[in-house]
Amino acid sequence: MTRATMLTAADIMSARPVAVRSDASIAEAIGVLLRKDLSGLPVVADERRLVGILSERDCLRVLAVGQYSDAEHERLRSVAEFMSAPTYTAPPEAGLYSLADFFLTHHQRRLPILVQGKLVGIVARRDVLRGIQEMIRRRALPLPAELRGPSLYPSATDTSPGVLGTRLDD
């Protein structure tokens, strides 16, 4: 396969993903996760410099460690107190195979894409699946012989009408 046909992070990433600032309240961040139906958010500082990741799991710690007392409700603690440091990032030119390998070998759901330390996108596992689907569609992904030939189980469209609906004991 040539490099020209290989999809990269830049091809499949969500460009300028929804992010939250580190000084936002955890309540605001939970609201964003729920409104946008996301499982995590990049946490940024000035000029979209990545400083952390806030996952659903991080948010659960609000209750799990008893962070809120009556007095704490008034203060609404910041995202910076709950986020995880970003341990993995990738450049936009990272290839689809490398991205798939990353998600297979690391228990992560998303991978921030950085250029000079600034967040330019995010790749989720589902984005990699879409990339695989696109490469199959382009016939740019080598498939095993059994997937290139006729289907083992014919679909209704390639089965004669007399066969469909026939009972075995008839």
Image (tube, grey):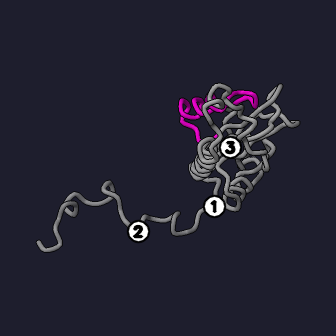
Contact between marks 3 and 1 (CB within 8 A): the answer is no
Relative depth, front residue between 31 and 25? 25
Q: For the residues marked 3 and 1, what is the alpha-carbon distance in whole angstroms? A: 23 Å
Residue 88 at x, y percent in the picture: 78, 50
- Tell me the mark number nearer the camera, choosing from 3 and 1: 3
Q: Is mark 2 on a helix, strand or loop?
A: loop
Residue at 62% x, 49% y is 125
Residue lying farthest left? 170
Relative depth, front residue between 146 and 95? 95
Whether residue 29 is situated above or below residue 9 in the rendered picture: above
Q: Is residue 149 visible?
A: yes
Q: Is residue 11 visible?
A: no
Q: Which mark is residue 152?
A: 2
Q: For the residues marked 2 and 3, what is the alpha-carbon distance in whole angstroms? A: 34 Å
- For the C terminus, the quadrant is bottom left
Judged left or right of residue 121, residue 34 is left
Type of residue at label 3?
Answer: Val
Type of residue at label 2?
Answer: Leu
- Per the rendered image, the range of residues in magenta is 19-40
Decide which of tag 1 and tag 2 comes sooner along the chain: 1
Q: Name the residue under label 1.
A: 142
Q: For the residues marked 1 and 2, what is the alpha-carbon distance in whole angstroms? A: 19 Å
Residue at 37% x, 66% y is 153
